[in-house]
Image (tube, rainbow, N blue to C red):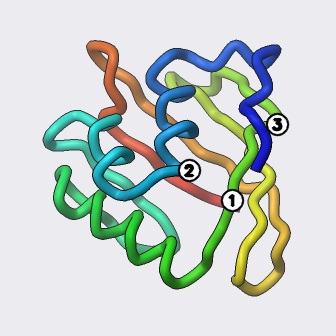
Amino acid sequence: MTETNPQLNLPAPIAAYFEADRLDGEALARCFAPDAVVIDDGHTHTGAEAIKAWKEESDNRYAATSEPIACVEEGGATVVTSHTVGNFPGSPLDLRYFFRLEGGVITALTVTL
């Protein structure tokens, strides 16, 4: 995975998310509020431990890398389109990450096609 494109001007918590995504579940979980919610692939993960487990399971299952390619504001969310490559059907895909931020941390994330 290459460096996050600085021209996207990602909000700091979202840029930190994509940097942590290259690391591990512990690093990624620190990007979220303690009671944050992640919805991905039809499953809901609530709280730091569940988010850490989601990241670790995803890494083991898909070995995916993700590179942000676009960022817009939409309906109160920051929506990042990210080119994602991994061991999953249809790879590569451009996934949409709907981030909700509060107090400098991610409070909710929904990942869709």
Question: Along the horizontal axis of the image, is 31 left or right of 41?
Answer: left
Question: Taking 55 as reference, is 102 above or below it?
Answer: above
Q: Are marks 2 and 1 in contact (CB under 8 Å)?
A: yes
Residue type at the position of mark 2: Arg
The one of 78 and 66 positioned closer to us in this rendering:
66
Residue type at the position of mark 1: Thr
Disc 3 from disc 2: Cα separation: 16 Å
Q: Total of numbered circles in the picture?
A: 3
- Which mark lies nearer to you, 3 or 2? 2
The label shown at residue 69 is 3
Screen quadrant of the C terminus: bottom right
The label shown at residue 65 is 1
What residue appears at the point 34 percent right and 35 percent down from the top-left corner?
Answer: 31
Task: Give SS at disc 3.
Answer: strand
Residue type at the position of mark 3: Ile
The image position of residue 36, as x and y in percent, is 24, 43
